[in-house]
Image (spheres, rainbow, N blue to C red):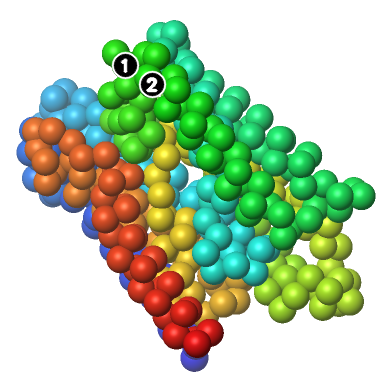
Amino acid sequence: MMRLKRKTLFFVLLVLYCILAIGAISVGAANIKPCEVFMEILKYIPIIGKHIDTVPSDTNFLIVFMVRMPRIIMASIVGMGLAVVGTSFQSLFKNPMADPYVLGISGGAALGAALAITVHLPAAPFAFIGAVTTTIMVYLIVQVRSKTATIYLLLVGSAIGFLTSALISIIMVFNQEHASRIIFWMMGSFNASSWENIYITAPVVFVGTMIISFLYRDLNLMLVGEETAKSLGVETEKLKKGVIIIASMMIAVCVSFSGIIGFVGFLVPHMARIIVGPNNKVLIPFSALGGAIFLLLSDTLGRTIAAPGELPVGAVTALIGSPYFIYLLIKMKRRSG
């Protein structure tokens, strides 16, 4: 009965996502009716498209498929990736405060992007290099006798984050003409999304999500404790290294094309856990879908509330996530007290 309820809920959320996606495509500077968006999409689906008898519109095609759909898909993919990584990190570190950026990866990406912007180069490749470099640095620092000292990961990640933040501030002081662009990139945006970016991001996020999903049993045991997991046959060192490497690649590629978007990987897994429980077999797919919905909704709000301008999506997610973060801290304090 419980399994049936979860499947029904997942289907309802999937339908909600589809409705939200069509609604997000329909709103903007040039309004297109949701029914027109739906018909435009159906026209390009094999077999079904042959039976759609509508007058072709080059304008609608360009708006739907070349401008808005890449943005909607990219927001969904990034939301999915960040939520899945957040779920895996919270289980791996046994820390409810863990999020995708605990390893300082976002700081490395931001530093790489800031350097690229100051010399008029594309930010995404340098952001990716910065993120990967930071991950390697953190990983090497926490290695103790060929073991990944999980307890130090958060501390080292924070220290790297402070260091990169200081370096970015120095860069902006000496390159004030680029400061606003650097800040806007750091606050997150899908304004420059394209199909080319999706072709790079989607495989990494989908494959990474599948691999992490297959590790749900080991992640469940890690929640009980590392020693207990070891006694039950989990190769904890291999698990930690594998999850960290996979998650880091997912974060690096997401941050490279979207900037730093906080609270998705922290908030969504918590909300999903409240609804479906802590079992990662169920939690990971629900978090993936929830992340896609949450970030798509945040991006749509960001580009419609301030129209014809645009609010950085990171600012919208922070406005939603910060109150919940404070609530969680208060709740944890009451429990410990």
Q: Which residue in the protein does label 2 denote? A: 172
Task: For label 2, count other residues whose C-alpha is less than 10 Å away and answer few (under 14), some (14-19) or many (20+).
Answer: many
Residue 215 x %, y %? 71, 62
Position of 235 compared to 197: left or right?
Answer: right
Label 1, secondary structure: give it: helix
Position of 268 compared to 89: left or right?
Answer: left
Residue at 46% across / 80% down in the picture? 333
Relative vertical location of residue 11 with respect to residue 56 in this rendering, above or below: below
Residue at 82% across / 46% down in the picture? 143
Q: Which residue in the protein does label 1 denote? A: 176
Residue 259 seen by the camera: yes
Q: Amino acid at mark 2?
A: Met
Label 2, secondary structure: give it: helix
Task: For label 1, count other residues whose C-alpha is less than 10 Å away and answer few (under 14), some (14-19) or many (20+).
Answer: few
Residue 255 x %, y %? 48, 37
Marker count (numbered): 2
Residue 61 seen by the camera: no
Residue 60 x %, y %? 15, 30
C-alpha distance separating marks 1 and 2: 5 Å
Q: Amino acid at mark 1?
A: Gln
Q: Identify which residue, 110 or 141, lies in the foreground.
A: 141
Q: Identify which residue, 218 or 38, lies in the foreground.
A: 218
Are the two marked residues, 1 and 2, in contact with CB atoms closer than 8 angstroms? yes
